[in-house]
Structure formats: structure tokens, C-alpha cells
Amino acid sequence: MENLERLLREHDFLKDLAQPQAASLVSCVKNLRFESGAFLMREGDEASTFYLLRRGRVVLEVDVPGKGPLVMESLGPGDIVGLSWLFPPHRVHIDARAVDPVVALAFDGGCLRGKMEEDHDLGFALTRRLLAETYKRLQRVRLQRLDVYANP
Amino acid sequence: MTARTDPWSPTPTRILRVRRETRDTFTVELEGQNRAFEPGQFNMLYLFGIGEVPVSISGDPGNPDVLVHTIRAVGTTTLAMKRQAKRGSALGVRGPFGSAWPVRAAEGDDLLIMAGGLGLAPLRPVMYHALRHRQRFGRVTLLYGARSPEDLLFRSEHGRWARKDCVVEVTVDRAGPNWVGRVGVVPALVDVTPLDPARTTAMLCGPEVMMRFSVRTLEARGLAHERIFVSMERSMKCAVGFCGHCQFGPTFVCKDGPVLRLDRIARLFGKREI
């Protein structure tokens, strides 16, 4: 347990989270390993898990009919995977596939939502972090959409 | 920096080799004629009877026997160049022109080189210089992005650079499932790069939007504008600061640039209608 708490507080997403708050999250989290090629989540599945990547790389991809999977973004240590666990209808919208052996802290989404409801200070601290990550990702998607390397 | 000869007269220069880089980009190696240049400078290349274009020098500044230019075929002149440039034929060369990357001033610093698309071409001389004088620099990091894996330039050299104590992080905007590298934009690579703002010199070249986004991520990491250098692209015609085609506020990109320190142009960088 103490070890999990340390791993949580070492992750970029939870850095500077107060010790009691980090300790309260331990009961929701497991340290998981995925082989290369394994899916952390698949489009259409119930969104029940929130991952903090510790090692290895994960790609977010969408299957495009007639084209196969198109990789939208790759993520690595320090990144988060999965946002749909936070909002109804709790359905995954994108595939997340390990391209290396991956180690991740996996939160039970329902458990985490419960903690955030019980302790609004914790809820605010996590929501602010999630929003910051979402905003960073939005900025990246905006730049990607501009297709800046296309022919002028 | 001034041209070696009459800046108005192109010198006919023999093509030694033409190499295809990607579907729309090719590299021309010309007889160097001992024409020294600084990393970041450009030449005006004239395809006789068709037109003249500014092209950054993408070769090794330590080898003045060969003048290397990497060109994207997108306009009338460069498309014709792609069709007509053959070993043994000639191009007119004026130059070298423009300012250079501050490779000497940056000695002792970490180098953070950020390139997008064809922007790697004017930064490749910096890589050659830094790796030839590796002991003069701290950490050397190249962050490079392109549209797709097929659009990556100088792929065979990335591994070679990485083996010479240089961190090379490559990303593409989009990819199929067979690509095992990173997918995402260049500024995102800054987040995964160790960076000491007190001893890092950043050199950026790529589409202006990519540079703007990159500058924001560097600012967020505490890098001062005095430590960020960008290579600007504007329509250059005369290359010696007379015609005004490349005017960027009070700056002539051909003469005062293309390499400019960010604090000197920050007021205009990203401003509309400039």
C-alpha cells in the first residue's frame, strides 16, 4: 500500500497532491503490466479504468473502415489514458494499444468517482489536473488539425 | 554575412548528384568550389531560363567541397528543378546569404534543435557541426516532426546521430498501425525532454505555426526569448536587402535573418499581416 502511494505521488499527473489525498486513492488503484500489442481499452467498451502510464508507450487509434487503424497520438510515461470513465455514458471512444511493454497505474473509475464525490477538495484537485491534461491535448489536436506540413 | 562574389551574378555550378528524399523533396549536391558557409545560411539557386529560389544549405559546413541543398518541389521553379536537375547539369548559385545559427555562442550550452518538416534541412548543418565538435556542447537534443513517416527527411541519419551521444526524438502527425514511433506534434516532445533553461539554446525551424506553438511550450519550461532562435521564411528575391520582398517589420529576412533571436522579433512573431 505504501509502495502504491509512493508510485502515485511520483507520477506527473499526481505530483504535489497532498499526502492524505494520495493515501485515500490507494484503495482504487492497481499496478498493471501489458504486453506489447495488448489493448488497455477498446472503443465501445465500458469505460471503467483510468490509467497513469509509468513505462512504455501506448497509441490511441481509431479504426477507419477501408483504411484500418489510424494512429491519432502516442503517449508515454507521465501521460494519462482514458477520460470517459468520468462522464456518463462511461463508454470508451478510442482504442488504446500498447506498442511496448507497458506498466501503468490503473484506477477503478467507479471507485475514483466515488472518492471525488466524497471529498470535494480531492475532486477539485483531480478535476483541475484532468482539465489541464485535456487542454494540453486539445492544443496538440489543434496543431495536428492545421496540417502545417501540407503543401502551401 | 556577405556573398563571396558579386551578389547579383549567379555562378554556374555543376551538379554532382541528385537524390530523392521523399515524394516531393529532393537533395541536390553541387560542386562546392570551396564556398564556405555557416549553418543556417542560404543560397539563391537559379534554374536557367525558369527562375531563382532561395534554398537553405543542408550540408556539412566542414566540407566546403560539396554544396548541399534540400528542396521541396512546390512551385514552378522547384518543380522544374526536380524534373531537370541531373548529374552533370548546372544551376546558378548566388550566396551564401543571411545570418547563421549561433553555434559558437552556444558552446558550453545544451542544444535543443526543433525542426518540423523541411525545417530539418537548415538545421542539419547544426547537427553536423555539433557532432563534429561534440565536446563543446552539453546535451544535444533533436526534436523532429513531419506529416507522416514517409515524409521524414534524412531518416538514415537519425540513428547515426543518436549513436553519437545525441538524443533524437521523432514524431509524425499521423501514421498507420505499422509505425512504431511517436505520433503527435513537435511541441509535445518538449514535455518529455529534460531542459535546463539556464543553459539551453533552442534553435527552431519549420512552419511558422509549428514554431509559435513550440515557443509557447519552451516559454512554459522557463526558456528566455534570448535563448530561442528561429529561422523565418519570407519571399526572398534579391537576397541582399534591397528589394523589400522579405520585409518583416523593420527586418529584412534575407539580410538580417533568416536566423533571428526571438526577443528581437517577439513583438511581431505571430502577428497578423506581417
Image (cartoon, rainbow, N blue to C red):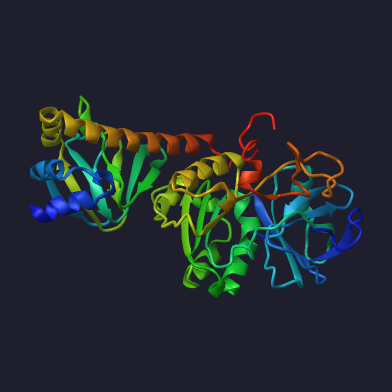
Left or right of residue A121: residue B22? right
Viewer-nearest residue: B37 or A44: B37
Residue occupying the point 25% across, 40% down: A42
User: Can I make out residue A44 in this image?
Assistant: no
Residue A129 locus on image (x, y percent):
28, 37
Relative to residue B155, is residue A19 drawn left or right?
left
Residue A25 in the image: state x and y as whole percent: 12, 42
Instruction: Identify which residue, A86 or B193, lies in the foreground.
Output: B193
Q: Is residue B2 left or right of residue A18?
A: right
Q: Residue furthest top?
A: A88
In this rendering, the count of numbered labels is: 0
Residue A64 x/y as whole percent: 38, 37
Q: Of residues A96 and B168, which is closer to you in this image?
A: B168
> Is B72 above or below relative to B14?
above
The N terminus of chain B sits in image quarter:
bottom right
- Residue at 14% of width from left, 40% of height from top? A21
Q: Quadrant of the C terminus of chain B?
A: top right
Q: Is residue B216 visible?
A: yes
Question: At which x and y percent is residue A36?
Answer: 27, 56
Against B46, residue B90 (above or below) is below
At 46% across and 48% down in the image, what residue appears? B222
